[in-house]
Amino acid sequence: MNLLITGICGFVGSTLVRALREHSEKLQIFGVDNLSRPGSEVNRTALGKLGVKFIHADIRSQTDLAVLPPADWVIDAAANPSVLAGIDGVASSRQVVEHNLLGTINLLEYCKAHRAGFILLSTSRVYSIPPLAALPLEVHRQAYRLAPHAIHPPGLTTNGVTESFSTNSPVSLYGSTKLASETLALEYGETFGFPVWINRCGVLAGAGQFGKADQGIFSFWLQAHRQRRPLKFIGFSGCGHQVRDCLHPRDLASLLARQMNEASDSRRRVQNLGGGLANSMSLAQLHEWCDARFGRHPVQAEPRGRPFDIPWLVMDTTLATSQWNWRPVTGLESILEEIAVHAEQNPNWLELSTV
C-alpha cells in the first residue's frame, strides 16, 4: 500500500511515520512538506534515514500535487494549527484559508484522480466557542471541571465534548477552515466514490513538538519553564485554571491503520480522538508539574483574555471506543516526562523551532 502523508516533516506527520511503520511493514510511505515551519528540516533528515521519500511541495499548489506519484491513501497532517491564525499578525487571514482549506481541496482532487482514500486530521476547535465559553464550571485542585448537577448543553457528557456538540460559528478562522474541509471531504468521498475518515483530534503533544504559546502548549510550557523564560497565565482571572486533554500522535497509528484497511466500512465517518478526562490537565497543574520536575519558576498573571480562548475542552471519545475499540495508550505523565527528557537533551529546541 502506498501512503502519502502531507506535512510529513511536522511533529505529527513525522511521528505517524514511525508509528505506522510499527503497525505495517508493507506500507510504502512518501510525503510532502513546504518546510515553512522552523525546525522541520531536522525531521526531514531523520525521515530520510528511515527510507521515507520526501518531496518538497506545497499543497496549496495544484502544479506541485500534479507531479506526485499515485497513492492508495492520503493522511492530511498539514495545516496552520493556531486558533489565533489570521489575527496574530504572523499569517494573514487569506494564508490561513489557503493553507487549511484550499490545500484540502487540492488533495481531494488528487484523491479523485488516483482513487485514493482520504484521512483528515481535524481538530477539537471545530466546536462552537459561545457554548464552550458558557459551560457551568467550578474550580477543583487548581483546575476547572464541569459543575456537578448542572444542566449541560446538547453534545456534552460527563466525559466531555461529543461529536454532536454544536459547530455553529464562531469557531475561529482555524476552526472554520477545518470544519469546511471536513464537509468538502465527505462530499467528495460520496460524490466520487472514495473512502473518507474525519478524525477530530484534541491537543497533540510529545517529544519533538515545535511548541509555541498558541499551539503545542504542553511542549512549549515545559521547554520555556526549563529555560526559565517568562510565562503567563492569560485570561480566566490569570489563575491558569483552563483545562485541555492531551494525546500523543503515535496513539493514532493503530486507528489509522485500521481505517486504511476498512475502506468500505459502514461506521460513522467523523469521530473524536483525544486524551479524555484521564489525560486532562490545567495550565496551573502543568506549571506545578514543571516546578516539581525542573525547580520553581515564577509565572505572571494576565487576567485579560485573548480571542477564541475557552476555559475547558476535553474530548469524549466514546464513539471511537465503541466503533474501533480505540483508546489512548500513552498516559499524561508519560507524555510530560517524554517532553521533559527531550527538553534536557535539546536545550535550544525553542530557538530552533521559533526562529
Image (tube, rainbow, N blue to C red):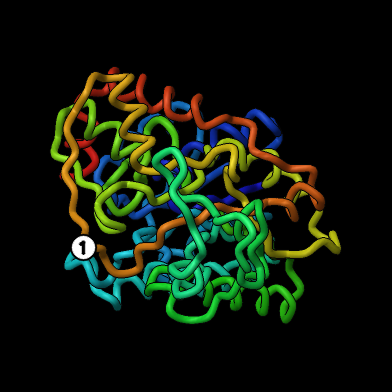
Question: For residue 222, which quarter of the picture?
Answer: top left
Position above or below: 61 against 289: below
- Report if residue 118 is visible in the image: no
**Residue 233 vs residue 44: left or right?**
left
Residue at the spot of label 1: 304
Disc 1 residue type?
Arg
Q: Indicate the position of residue 117 as horizontal and vertical percent values.
A: 69, 61
Residue 10 x, y percent position in the rendering: 40, 45
Quadrant where the N terminus sits is: top right
258 horizontally vs 309: left or right: right
Q: What element carries label 1?
A: loop
x then y, percent, for residue 133: 43, 68
Residue at (17% x, 68% y) in the render: 89
Q: Residue at x 29, y 48 (%)?
A: 239
On screen, residue 49 above or below 56? above
Task: Name the quarter where the C terminus is drawn.
Answer: top left
Q: Which of 255 and 164 is in front in this view?
A: 164
Residue 210 x %, y %? 32, 41
Residue located 62% across and 36% down the image: 20
Q: Can residue 215 be seen in this view?
A: yes
Front residue of 58 and 175: 175
User: Is 175 on the left or on the right of 233, as rendered?
Assistant: right
Q: Which is nearer the eye, 125 or 54? A: 125
| Occupied quadrant, residue 279 | top right
In the drawing, does residue 173 fall left or right of residue 134?
left
Dot 1 crowding, Cα within 10 Å, few <14, some 14–19, many 20+: few
Q: In this view, does 161 lie above or below 287?
A: below
Residue at x 47%, y 64% (from the top left corner): 125
